[in-house]
Image (spheres, helix red, strand yellow):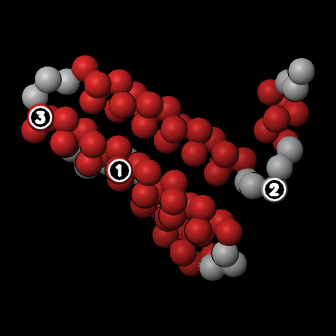
Amino acid sequence: MKRFRHFITEGKYPLWLRFTVGGIVLRIKNLQNKIDSEEDPVKQNKLISQQNTLLSYIGGLGIGVGSTDHVLLKKLKGSMVGPKK
């Protein structure tokens, strides 16, 4: 079984990226639970909008890290302050 210390040191992606994506995934799962339990369709749509914003951050990070464009990666890293309420 792998220990956490071994997990965070392996791979080609930077540590900040792995923790950021992990945090975003947890927020997406939390939003999904809220969407499932919400009865009001208007509130559900707002929660889905927040969830889509987080998914777009993950997609953007995948593109930014996969390319050699350091300016794009810097912009993505700086813009991830969370969804606006």
Residue, x 41% and y 49% (percent of image)?
Answer: 54
Q: Is residue 62 above or below residue 42?
A: below
Task: Check disc 3 and report its element: helix, strand or loop.
Answer: helix
The residue that label 1 is drawn on is: 52
For the N terminus, give its image quadrant: top right
Q: Looking at the image, is mark 1 or mark 2 earlier in the sequence?
A: 2
Label 1 neighbour load within 10 Å: few <14, some 14-19, many 20+: some
Pointer 1 with pointer 2, Cβ within 8 A: no
Q: CA distance from mark 1 to mark 2?
A: 26 Å
Most foreground residue, 25 or 45:
45
Q: CA distance from mark 3 to mark 1?
A: 16 Å
Residue located 40% across and 28% down the image:
30
- Taking depth in this image into account, of 77 and 26 the one nearest to the observer is 26
The percent coordinates of residue 85 (x first, y second) are 21, 44
Q: Which residue is mark 3?
A: 41
Left or right? Give the position of 39 relative to 23: left
Using the numbered discs, state the Cα–Cα distance from disc 2 to disc 3 in whole angstroms: 42 Å
Comparing labels 2 and 3, the label whose residue is closer to the camera: 3
Q: Which residue is mark 2?
A: 12
Q: Please indicate whether residue 6 sits to the left or right of residue 36 in the image.
A: right
Q: Is residue 16 left or right of residue 24?
A: right
Residue at 51% across, 64% down: 60
Camera-side residue: 53 or 37?
37
Number of labels in the image equals 3
Amino acid type shown at disc 2: Lys
At label 1, the amino acid type is Asn
- Give the residue drawn at x 25%, y 20%: 37
Q: Which mark is residue 32?
A: none
Q: Amino acid at mark 3?
A: Pro
Q: Quadrant of residue 27?
A: top left
